[in-house]
Image (cartoon, grey):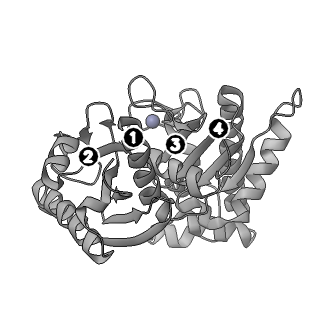
């Protein structure tokens, strides 16, 4: 391994975030630029390559100081082959041999992982899961992403698709999911699902002070439902509590499948703070077995938007070290 630093990149539909970790694992530089996804793959790819150079210059480093680049991508990909199969919200990103192209363009080794995996690894290295050996993270946003750390290593599975916990089945023959299954956890426990289930209940005839604004065409978010629940809206209280129950049951499934020390909840939904954490922990305590004292700690993620870049850079470091 030539350099001592690694670069982490977290690509999203709106922004590309990048950061540099030093050899002590400290985030010494971070920046964010617009993705400009509407201009297609080649345009975004040029921005990625430029961003690497700009980060190195802005941090007052040289390319020889960099050991590797870690890259977190949304959507299906192959870590092993270094291919991005598709990226939601990124038109033209289909079957891209990203690792080979990015590595050729930058002259640096590149490692590729799913964005939920890199965020989980970030929380494991430097956030809510720091100090644990076995940890699972659920990212609660538009959908639900997951990341599994076993024995200190990211668990990718035989087909690079481990930890798609959002697509474990919460309800038999339940709400349809864009993935093709029915009853997926993310159709009940994601931020989007909170708002959708609330609107469906209104359409089925239930009442709420928010009914008028929904009928006027306003788009509700999970934050609206959570605030309404806090204000005592009975329907919002029920939908929010059911959401926390689904998430607690997912934590129980994780407990019995992997027996981790810690389950970390991340993503936009954790903006609710204790309004989310307390009921999830409460339902977990009530529903999980008492046969063994093996309940994982349930914690909120602490790194926010930095989790992805820290995790991607740390994964690049761990791969560089194993190659050396
Ligand atoms: Zn699904």
Please tell me the numbered disc located at residue 109: 2
Seen from the viewer's position, the closer of residues 70 and 323 is 323
* Ligand 1 image-quadrant field: top left
* Residue 97 placement: quadrant: top left
N-terminal of the two: label 4 or label 3?
4
Please tell me the numbered disc located at residue 273: none
Tag 1–tag 2 contact (CB < 8 Å): yes
N-terminal of the two: label 2 or label 4?
2
Give the residue pinned by disc 1: 319
Disc 4 from disc 3: Cα separation: 14 Å
Nearer to us of marks 1 and 4 is 1
Disc 3 from disc 1: Cα separation: 21 Å
Disc 3 from disc 2: Cα separation: 25 Å
Asked if residue 161 can be seen in this view, the reply is: yes
- Name the element at disc 4: loop
Give the residue pinned by disc 3: 146
Give the residue pinned by disc 4: 134
Residue 23, percent from left and from top: 46, 58
């Amino acid at each position: 391994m030539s350099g001592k630093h690694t670069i982490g990149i977290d690509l999203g539909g709106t922004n590309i975030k990048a950061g540099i970790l030093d050899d002590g694992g400290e985030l010494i530089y971070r920046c964010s630029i617009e993705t400009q996804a509407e201009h297609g793959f080649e345009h975004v790819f040029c921005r990625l390559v430029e961003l690497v150079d700009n980060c190195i210059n802005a941090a007052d480093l040289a390319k020889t100081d960099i050991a590797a680049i870690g890259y977190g991508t949304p959507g299906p990909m192959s870590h092993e082959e270094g291919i991005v199969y598709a990226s939601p919200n990124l038109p033209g990103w289909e079957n891209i041999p990203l690792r080979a192209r990015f590595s050729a363009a930058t002259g640096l080794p590149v490692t590729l992982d799913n964005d939920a995996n890199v965020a989980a690894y970030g929380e494991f290295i430097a956030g809510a899961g720091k100090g644990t050996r076995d940890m699972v993270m659920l990212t609660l946003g538009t959908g639900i992403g997951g990341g599994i750390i076993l024995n200190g290593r990211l668990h990718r599975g035989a087909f690079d698709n481990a930890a798609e916990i959002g697509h474990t089945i919460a309800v038999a023959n339940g709400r349809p999911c864009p993935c093709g299954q029915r009853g997926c956890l993310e159709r009940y426990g994601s931020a989007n699902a909170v708002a959708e289930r609330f609107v469906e209940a209104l359409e089925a005839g239930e009442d709420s002070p928010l009914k008028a604004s929904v009928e006027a065409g306003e788009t509700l978010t999970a934050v609206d439902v959570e605030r309404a629940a806090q204000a005592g809206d009975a329907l919002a209280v029920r939908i929010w509590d059911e959401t926390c129950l689904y998430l607690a049951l997912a934590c129980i499934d994780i407990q019995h499948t992997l027996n981790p020390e810690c389950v970390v909840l991340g993503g936009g939904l954790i903006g609710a703070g204790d309004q989310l954490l307390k009921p999830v922990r409460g339902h977990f305590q009530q529903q999980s077995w008492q046969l063994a004292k093996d309940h994982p700690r349930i914690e909120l993620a602490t790194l926010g938007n930095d989790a992805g870049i820290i995790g991607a850079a740390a994964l690049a470091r761990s791969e560089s070290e194993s190659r050396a």
